Image: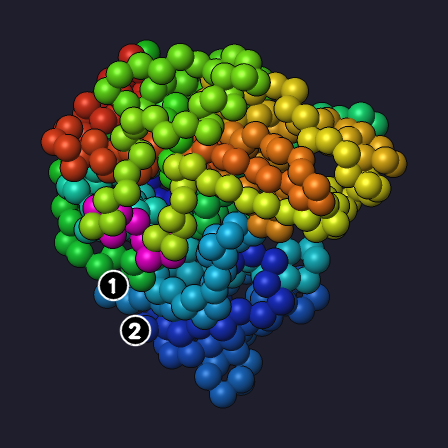
Amino acid sequence: MKHQPKITVGIMDHQTEVNGRLDGHFRSDVFGSASGRFSAKSDAGMIVLFDAVHQEMTRSPSIKLTGQDKSKFSLFGVTIGSRFHWERTEDQTFGGDLILRPRKDGTITVINETPLEDYLKSVISSEMSSAAPMEFLKAHAILSRSWILAALDRNKKTEKTSKSPEKTTDDEVIRWHDREEHDLFDVCADDHCQRYQGVTKIVSKQAEEAIRKTWGMTITYQGKICDARYSKACGGITENFDTAWNDKQVPYLKSISDASGSYRPIKTEEEASAWILSNPDAYCNTQDEALLGKILPDFDRKTKDFFRWTIEYSHSELEEILRKKSGLDFGVLGEIVPIARGPSGRIYRLKIVGSKRSIVVGKELEIRRWLSRTHLYSSAFVVKAGPGRFTFRGAGWGHGVGLCQIGAAVMAAQGFSAEKILKHYFQDVEIKNLY
């Protein structure tokens, strides 16, 4: 590869109506130039584009608006953190081209086509604050570049589908969520892939400098670009790939201690309880508010208890959540029993026992979804059933696989280089230039 590719990012999907503004001049592939406010709807498989006074500009099976002279476009009411506890809507601004495509259900998909390195400037500013330590931003740039290039390569080799992989029987629901469901674009713009919020979050030159200093650099294992995963806070030990996704071993995505020393992998329920109820030394175990203010975006800073956390439900509340999130009626909830855990303590098979039925659920993200109105912070938890209440004590924030973002930022603040940070979380890898 000699030059950076362009990628397509799904910003909004399954929208009945889209509203925004073209800042500057855009050229259409089906009509002339356009600028100013616009709206769009789907009608009989066609995209109908309206101007600021709601006059129809064009209708077409697909519309691409190409920005001229670094023009930008804004989209109103974009959802971020979809179905997570920090979900919200905001207006966002993007560079590159705007693509509108209809879906068969009568809704619209909104796509941003942009050069990969411009995409990365936004990703590292959206995932974490662009005021974070430079070595962390450089590490994240290399990490995120590797992730998207691996995704592009994977998309070429596999047929996309709208369904998440799953193994479902009367007694089990084992489901994991990966990138296969993106059929009209390469990657989405939310936490399901990588946070991408356009130029809205680029508030300093540090993000641009991090991209410039790492231009084309990737993480490789035995000559191949790594499918480099990451989460917000591992809780002291990172997790194996197969705890979160399909049943295969990925050599560079194995569990490691997020500390200068080494912790034993968790193997028993007694060890899980002792670990989760403890307060071990770890890079991501920081209460430094000044540092967290520099590394976390504003909406993430509201999550204070990411390293160790507690959530309580009444029996009736958790029964109602389970009915809504699983679509199953368990009746009176009896027990919540971990069946299998990964080395970080994250559960990937959990038995839920009710008066009407019992079922085993997995993997880690599905467990987190079933047991919360949004998501539990992680599936590394122990449960205590008391009179009328279930108490969850947990560790970490996210799936825990690969790089621990808060841990990596703390390492950078302590003087570690980007390369040492990456080689800490991804074992036996090399950092190489692709272009």
Is residue 388 in view?
Answer: yes
Residue 51 at what x, y percent from top left?
A: 48, 81
Please identify the quadrant where the N terminus is shown.
top left
Q: Amino acid at mark 1?
A: Lys
Q: Are marks 1 and 2 in contact (CB under 8 Å)?
A: yes
Residue placed at 57% from the left, 26% from the top?
Answer: 347
Residue placed at 38% from the left, 48% from the top?
Answer: 304
Q: Is residue 52 above or below residue 322?
A: below
Reading the image, the residue beneath label 2 is 24
Residue positioned most to the front: 387
Residue positioned most to the right: 356
Badge count: 2
Disc 1 residue crowd, few under 14, some 14–19, many 20+, Cα 10 Å: few
Reading the image, the residue beneath label 1 is 70
Quarter where residue 287 is shown: top left
Residue range (magenta): 291-300
